[in-house]
Image: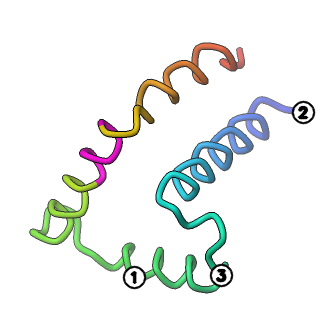
Amino acid sequence: MTADRKREARQKFLLGGIVVRAGLAKADRAFLLGGLIELARIAPGSAEHRRLRDAGEEAFKATGLDADQARIRESTEWH
């Protein structure tokens, strides 16, 4: 597996973990994609973007996801 493919697989793994942490593991895929498309339409730096980012930051702190990601990063770094 090339380094690019490994990076892409790792990114998908981490994003999947976010979906699970958000409680959406059993959600319909079309629903998830629709929600992500709506999120992509929110202008960076807007009040809504800041509100959602703040909510995400709080969720990361509450669940320890940042620490989990750091441990995964340390144990799976590809050179």
The image quarter in which residue 76 lies: top right
Q: Residue at x 77, y 35 (%)?
A: 6
From this view, report whether residue 35 is shown above or below residue 54: below
Q: Secondary structure at mark 1?
A: helix
Residue name at image x 69 percent, y 36 percent:
7
Q: Are marks 2 and 3 in contact (CB under 8 Å)?
A: no
Q: Are marks 1 and 2 in contact (CB under 8 Å)?
A: no
Any magenta on residue 72?
Answer: no
Q: Which mark is residue 28?
A: 3
On residue 1, which mark appears?
2
- Residue extending furthest left? 47
Q: Residues within 10 Å of mark 1 (few under 14, many from 20)?
A: few
Identify the magenta region: 56-61
- Examine the residues drawn in magenta and state their main secondary structure: helix
Dot in front, 1 or 2: 1
Residue 67 spot, x, y in % from top left = 44, 24
Percent x, y for residue 37?
A: 46, 80
Is disc 3 surrounded by few (<14), some (14 to 19) or many (20+) residues within 10 Å?
few
Q: Which residue is mark 1?
A: 38
Q: Residue at x 33, y 79 (%)?
A: 41
> Secondary structure under badge 2?
loop
> In x, y percent, where is residue 57?
26, 45
Quadrant in the picture for the N terminus: top right
The amino acid beneath tag 1 is Glu
